[in-house]
Image (spheres, helix red, strand yellow):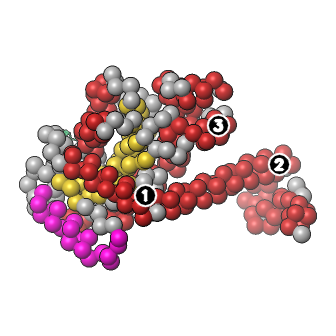
Amino acid sequence: MQDLVAELLNGNRRAAARMISLVENDDPQKRDLLKDLYPHTGNAYVVGVTGAPGSGKSSLVDWLLKVIRKDDLKVGVIAVDPTSPFSGGAILGDRIRMQDHALDSDIFIRSMGTRGSLGGLSRATREAIQVLDAFGKDLILIETVGVGQSEVDIVKTADSTLVVLTPAGGDSVQTIKAGIMEIADIFVINKSDLPGAEKTTAEINQMLDMKSSEVWRPPVVPTVSVSNEGINELWKATQEHRDYMEKSGRLLDIRRERVRRELTEQVEYLVKSRIWDRVKSKIELDSVVEKIVKRKQDPYSTASDLLAAINFYDQDTKEGG
Ligand SMILES: Nc1nc2c(ncn2[C@@H]2O[C@H](COP(=O)(O)OP(=O)(O)O)[C@@H](O)[C@H]2O)c(=O)[nH]1
Ligand SMILES: [Mg+2]
């Protein structure tokens, strides 16, 4: 396992792929690995690309890769699809994309689907970002489907978020999901070759006008990802947002916030696993459950009693003074 970290830091792609599989499978060894990687992280900038299925995220990411590579940045791509049971390998168009960039050793592409819970997927995504960060990627693109709660959680990991919309045809964009305005740093109107693109762009701009004057006003960038239009502008807008994030101190703020959340989660995880293991070693869980089901006990006092049985409160008074 120690070798795996050394190999990854040496730029071994198979080590990176293996490590992502370990975090994806929630392998017991992953904590130690992530711990060893941590000092080597913190360099990568993370860009999230989110939008409805078929809006053109993969095509956009594909073109973006070409533009970004001209800037000589090392890029990682994680395509997250909560609706897919597949992971590790390539899904759909990703397969073509991977072949396309396969010869470029500075690009690393990985798909992740749902193995367990959605919460598990967002955790695995965060950990895969850590892996690619330590692996030496300067920029990590996260492609996620949709804008539901789980995707919003994934997006929280991104430093800049691109929301991909398509022309609403004759319809109005009023129907765009709540929450989307809040997470977008940049709006992309992809498929701008289709009718209604200008109307959609204007409507988004109107909605942005109504929002209270925030320092960063999300630009609305029209693109046609099948013919590589607007991609340079999109990359420019992304760099401008990054610039804003860095210079305004926002980037440090959100990274602090993330560390705070991560630390809370880790403490909760340790408390939960240690304490719960001790509790379970003391009791016959099934029979306790039976008693509660039969209303001979209630879950509230049972929980306190269980903790008392492992001297949890004694420790509390000793350490708390
Ligand atoms: N007309 C048009 N079609 C596009 C454009 N971008 C993508 N598509 C098509 O939309 C479909 C879905 O694209 P894809 O990138 O796989 O979308 P994803 O599901 O969001 O990743 C594909 O058939 C693309 O060829 C565009 O700018 N204009
Ligand atoms: Mg896709």
Instruction: Give the amino acid type for the residue marked by disc 1 in the picture.
Output: Glu
Residue under numbered circle 1? 246
Q: Nearer the viewer, mark 3 or mark 1?
A: 1
Q: Earlier in the sequence, mark 3 or mark 1?
A: 3
Mark seen at residue 36: 3
Contact (CB < 8 A) between labels 3 and 1? no
Task: Name the residue tied to disc 2.
Answer: 278
User: Mark 1 touching mark 2, by CB under 8 A?
Assistant: no
Q: Is residue 198 magenta?
A: yes
Q: Confirm whether residue 261 shows in the render.
A: no
Q: Is residue 158 above or below residue 171?
A: above
Q: Position of residue 29 (x, y in %)?
A: 66, 34
The magenta-colored residue range is 197-215
* Label 1 element class: helix
Q: Residue drawn at (31%, 27%), measured in percent from left and top?
A: 101
- Asked whether mark 1 lies closer than 8 Å to ligand 1, one says no
In this view of the protein, can residue 231 be seen by the observer?
yes
Identify which residue is drawn at 35% across, 32% down.
Answer: 91
Q: CA distance from mark 2 to mark 3?
A: 28 Å
Locate residue 160, reporting x and y percent: 38, 54
Element under disc 3: helix
